[in-house]
Image (spheres, rainbow, N blue to C red):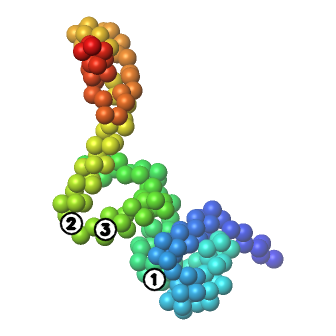
Amino acid sequence: MPRPKSAQAVDLEVGRKIRERRRALGMSQFSLAEIVGIASKQIQKYEQGVSQIGSGRLSEIAAALNVPISYFFPEPSTRRDFNGIEFVSGINSKEGMELNIAFSKIPSQKTRSAIIELLRAYIVRSTPRPVARHMSDRVNANVPRATVNVPDGVEPGEQNAGAQRQ
């Protein structure tokens, strides 16, 4: 007698991704089911990981949700492109999708470029960087360097500038 099927991790992940994408598009289970040509109860079962999805059906769902089939499967947490830039799979999070949708609606290339530069500046500013504490630290490479978190908007060397002027 065959064992009853239980939801496997990949079934749960695929179902979660279907629900996530459907909701991001503002689509109901009924609407998705209608497009794919199945009952909305079946979409519910797919989303809960109760029913496994065949490759043909997954292809139809992917087309209805306007994503590649690979969208539904787990990715490594990071990957690198040809330039060595690290991408985080957080783009598939709710916030990442909202950011992507909002960004794509900005008509001006100049504005989009300015937003990218703003984000790059924020990342650089919010990343702790080593700051030399003494002039001898800069001269003698054998002296251990201290790492100091520099507050946003303050350049190294400006921290005590106000005290010196008084």
Q: Position of residue 109 (x, y in %)?
A: 19, 64
What residue does disc 2 label? 108
Are there few (<14), some (14-19), or many (20+) residues within 10 Å of tag 1? some
Amino acid type at mark 2 = Ser
* Disc 3 + disc 1, Cβ < 8 Å: no
- Above or below residue 112? Residue 43 is below
Front position among marks 3 and 2: 2
Indicate left or right for 108 with 25 as reference: left
Q: Position of residue 106 (x, y in %)?
A: 27, 67
Question: How far is mark 1 from mark 2, CA to CA?
Answer: 29 Å
Q: Secondary structure at mark 1?
A: helix
Indicate left or right for 5 with 108 as reference: right
Q: Secondary structure at mark 2?
A: loop
Are there few (<14), some (14-19), or many (20+) residues within 10 Å of tag 2? few
What residue does disc 3 label? 104
Question: How far is mark 3 from mark 1, CA to CA?
Answer: 20 Å
The residue depicted at 29 percent of the width and 10 percent of the height is 134
Q: Position of residue 34 (x, y in %)?
A: 54, 91
Amino acid type at mark 3 = Ser
- Say whether disc 3 or disc 1 marks the residue closer to the N-terminus: 1
Which numbered tag is attached to residue 84? none
Question: How far is mark 3 from mark 2, CA to CA?
Answer: 10 Å
- Above or below residue 92? Residue 79 is above
What residue does disc 1 label? 64
The residue depicted at 35 percent of the width and 34 percent of the height is 152
Front position among marks 1 and 2: 2
* Disc 3 + disc 2, Cβ < 8 Å: no
- Say whether disc 1 or disc 2 marks the residue closer to the N-terminus: 1
Quadrant where the N terminus sits is bottom right
